[in-house]
Image (tube, rainbow, N blue to C red):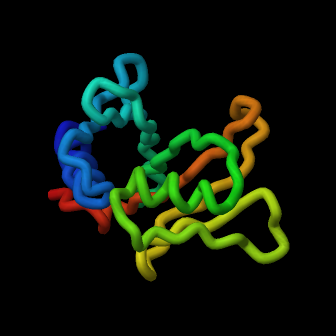
Amino acid sequence: MKETEIQSLTAYLVTLFSEKELTVLQHPEDDEQALVAIGQTFFARIDRDEDEGELSFNFSKDVPDQPHEELIEYFATIFNSKSVEVRRRKGRQSSAEIYKGEEFLGVLYDDEGSEAGMQVFNMAILDIDLDLD
């Protein structure tokens, strides 16, 4: 990832998560991936995707599998916001949509590749969401 992308992702995520200690760091072994930390603690990862000139980033965070009410509390805590909602998806028991107010943030789903007892929260970040020049 380019340094300007890292800086823009950091600024975007600091605002989104209301977390001043959040930083985005270039992955030491993969130029297309970054690591997200809060203080000294690993928080999530970001994969860069450029397809036919379209640039996007996939934010991915492992989340402990827990009852719906606890998921609401969990996401309210990590986003530092009481306006976070975990909406069940119709006809899909294994996934939910995450909103902050009326803004769609991403999808929480069971992933066969993740550890037992874990789900994955995925959030797309488009280049238009960032201040990239």
Numbered circles on residues, count? 0
| x and y percentages locating residue 71 in the rendered image | 60, 56
Q: Above or below — where is 7 with respect to 82?
A: above
Front residue of 27/60: it is 60
Q: Say left or right for 20 vs 92.
A: left
Residue, x 46% and y 41% (percent of image)?
47
> Residue at (44%, 60%) from the top-left corner?
76
* Quadrant, the C terminus: bottom left
Residue 120 vs residue 65, the one in the foreground: 65
Residue positioned 74% across, 48% down in the render: 110
| Direction from residue 11 to residue 103 in the image, left or right | right
Q: Residue 30 versus residue 63: which sits nearer the camera?
A: 63
Which quadrant holds the N terminus? top left
- The x and y percentages for residue 80 are 34, 57
**Which residue is found at the position 71% from the left and 54% from the top?**
67
- Give residue 131's quadrant in the image: bottom left
The residue furthest top is: 29
Is residue 128 something one can see in this rendering?
A: yes
Q: Is residue 53 visible?
A: no
Of all residues, the one furthest to the bottom in this rendering is 102
Horizontal and vertical percent position of residue 52: 46, 57
Vertical placement of 66 versus 117: above or below? Answer: below
Percent from the top left, x then y, of residue 119?
Answer: 67, 44
Residue 43, quarter of the rendered image = top left
Q: Find residue 56 and report its image quarter.
A: bottom left
